[in-house]
Image (tube, grey):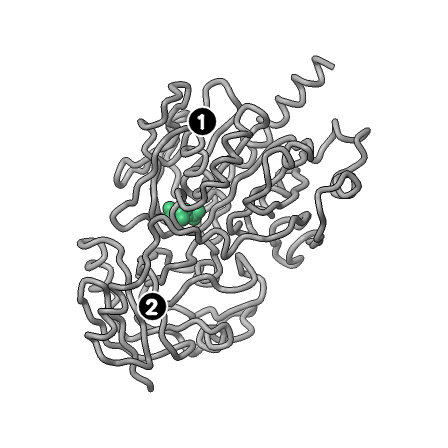
């Protein structure tokens, strides 16, 4: 067993054992309270720049399968667990967590007191850390953690977002069937010919499916699958795609995805979304919600340790219902800072009363800070995909009535 060290920027030291890849890695350390779903956590692109400590003490017990990923490669900078199970037991498992992390080059550490680490992060806030199997000198590692760049102001979106557009037609996973439909990767420019290839013939456009253009800031695959399930034909575009190009695709609606890091680090996307306000129905999830808030002239700020896990209680103020939600964010929106007084708070977090959702009273715009696509986690918030479709349908009906 090879020794590994985790140090935090404030001088805290945790001694453990290497698992996954050997080496050295730096990132902001955050804790995730999901009991299962470690594959989805590892591959959620929003974790770029961060290392995750799982609070559940046994991780890896149902192994790794090729289907439960939220992007093709892991995004986490490092993985921290109490105990990594070497004996997975599940009919879908094809390998161990340890061998997967080794193959993917993700540095992990196990055998540390993850409860103590989590309490430390709760008390002192999420902070930079280093895991190393190479350098076991605590002072040198603490210095490296202190010197690391952190998340504030950095554009991590460009490291995980697509660089050319593609269409997506695959629906959610079903027992006995797997994923429905096929995912088509299309590298194209936005010339007119491509637009016609990307979307059905204009004469059929008044019927389903709804044409959605999704800004990819590191989009989780299950969001795309849930949009398809709700009746959308999705074209995914890079975050620097100009608003005029998006409108040139004549979308029924625009989606703005989750993504890593500080929302203020992606000013070009804020600018694009600002130009789309009032032009098309818009739905934002997580980073997309924060970007929408910034585009509306509001402000975002960093939470002390954020919300990461599948057990966050949220109240929908429009229905009075409480839902248990999946979350993964370290920044939040200050809704009071939005000058447009037509913006309404729709969802709050019942643990700390922070903003979890908003909508515009007149325009077809809404967003949530949490993850209705779950993956991993509860499905209580699936209705939000239907809300998006309903907004697009009523816009179509209005336009149909006019025409
Ligand atoms: N999942 C996300 O989209 C995260 C949004 C943003 N990076 C945050 O940490 O708040």
Residue 270 in the image: above or below residue 98: above
Can you identify the residue that label 1 sits on? 359
Number of callouts: 2
Question: Image check: 140 left or right of 214?
Answer: left
Query: Can you tell which mark lies on residue 146?
Result: none
Q: What percent of the width, then of the height, locates residue 389?
A: 60, 31
Q: Alpha-carbon distance for marks 2 and 1?
A: 37 Å
Helix, strand, or loop for circle 2? strand
Q: Is residue 56 visible?
A: yes
Residue 345 in the image: above or below residue 8: above
Question: Image check: 170 left or right of 353?
Answer: right
Quadrant of res 49: bottom left
Is the residue marked 2 within 8 Å of ligand 1, measured from its CB? no
Within 10 angstroms of label 2, few (less than 14), some, or many (20 or more) residues? many
Helix, strand, or loop for circle 1? strand
Q: What percent of the width, then of the height, locates residue 127?
A: 26, 58
User: Which residue is depicted at the point 33% across and 81% down?
Assistant: 134
User: Which residue is depicted at the point 67% across and 35% down?
Assistant: 211
First in sequence, mark 2 or 1: give its number.
2
Query: Can you tell which mark lies on residue 80?
Result: 2
Taking depth in this image into account, of 128 and 52 the one nearest to the observer is 128
- Furthest toward the top, the residue is 402
User: Which residue is depicted at the point 51% across and 40% down?
Assistant: 382
Taking depth in this image into account, of 351 and 241 the one nearest to the observer is 241
Q: Is residue 328 visible?
A: no
Q: Quadrant of the C terminus?
A: top right
Q: Quadrant of the N terminus?
A: bottom left
Q: What percent of the width, then of the height, locates residue 23?
A: 38, 78
């Amino acid at each position: 067993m090879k020794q590994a060290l985790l140090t935090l920027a404030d001088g805290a030291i945790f001694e453990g054992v290497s698992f996954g890849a050997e080496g050295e890695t730096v990132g902001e350390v955050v804790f995730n309270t999901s009991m299962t779903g470690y594959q989805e956590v590892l591959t959620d692109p929003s974790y770029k720049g961060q290392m995750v400590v799982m609070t559940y003490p046994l991780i890896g017990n149902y192994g790794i399968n090729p289907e439960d990923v939220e992007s093709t490669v892991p995004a986490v900078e490092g993985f921290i667990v109490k105990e990594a199970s070497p004996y997975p037991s599940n009919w879908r498992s094809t390998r161990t967590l340890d061998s997967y992390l080794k193959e993917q080059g993700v540095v992990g550490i196990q055998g540390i007191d993850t409860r103590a680490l989590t309490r430390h992060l709760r008390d002192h806030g999420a902070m930079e850390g280093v895991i190393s199997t190479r350098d076991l000198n605590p002072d040198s590692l603490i210095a490296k953690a202190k010197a690391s760049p952190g998340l504030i102001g950095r554009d991590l979106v460009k490291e995980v977002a697509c660089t050319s557009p593609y269409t997506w037609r695959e629906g959610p996973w079903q027992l006995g069937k797997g994923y429905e439909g096929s995912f088509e990767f299309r590298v194209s420019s936005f010339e007119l010919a491509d637009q016609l290839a990307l979307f059905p013939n204009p004469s059929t456009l008044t019927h389903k499916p709804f044409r959605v253009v999704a800004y990819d800031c590191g989009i989780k695959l299950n969001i795309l699958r849930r949009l398809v399930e709700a009746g959308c034909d999705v074209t995914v575009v890079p975050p620097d795609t100009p608003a005029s190009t998006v409108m040139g695709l004549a979308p029924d609606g625009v989606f703005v995805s989750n993504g890593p890091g500080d929302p203020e680090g992606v000013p070009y996307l804020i600018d694009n979304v600002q130009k789309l306000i009032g032009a098309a129905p818009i739905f934002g999830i997580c980073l997309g919600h924060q970007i929408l808030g910034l585009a509306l002239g509001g402000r975002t700020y960093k939470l002390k340790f954020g919300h990461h896990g599948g057990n966050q209680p949220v109240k929908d103020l429009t229905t009075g219902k409480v839902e248990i939600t999946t979350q993964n964010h370290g920044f939040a929106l200050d809704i009071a800072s939005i000058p447009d007084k037509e913006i309404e708070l729709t969802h709050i977090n019942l643990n700390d009363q922070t903003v979890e959702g908003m909508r515009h009273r007149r325009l077809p715009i809404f967003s949530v800070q949490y993850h209705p696509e779950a993956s991993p986690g509860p499905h209580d918030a699936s209705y939000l995909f239907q809300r998006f479709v309903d907004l697009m349908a009523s816009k179509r009906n209005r336009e149909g009535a006019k025409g």
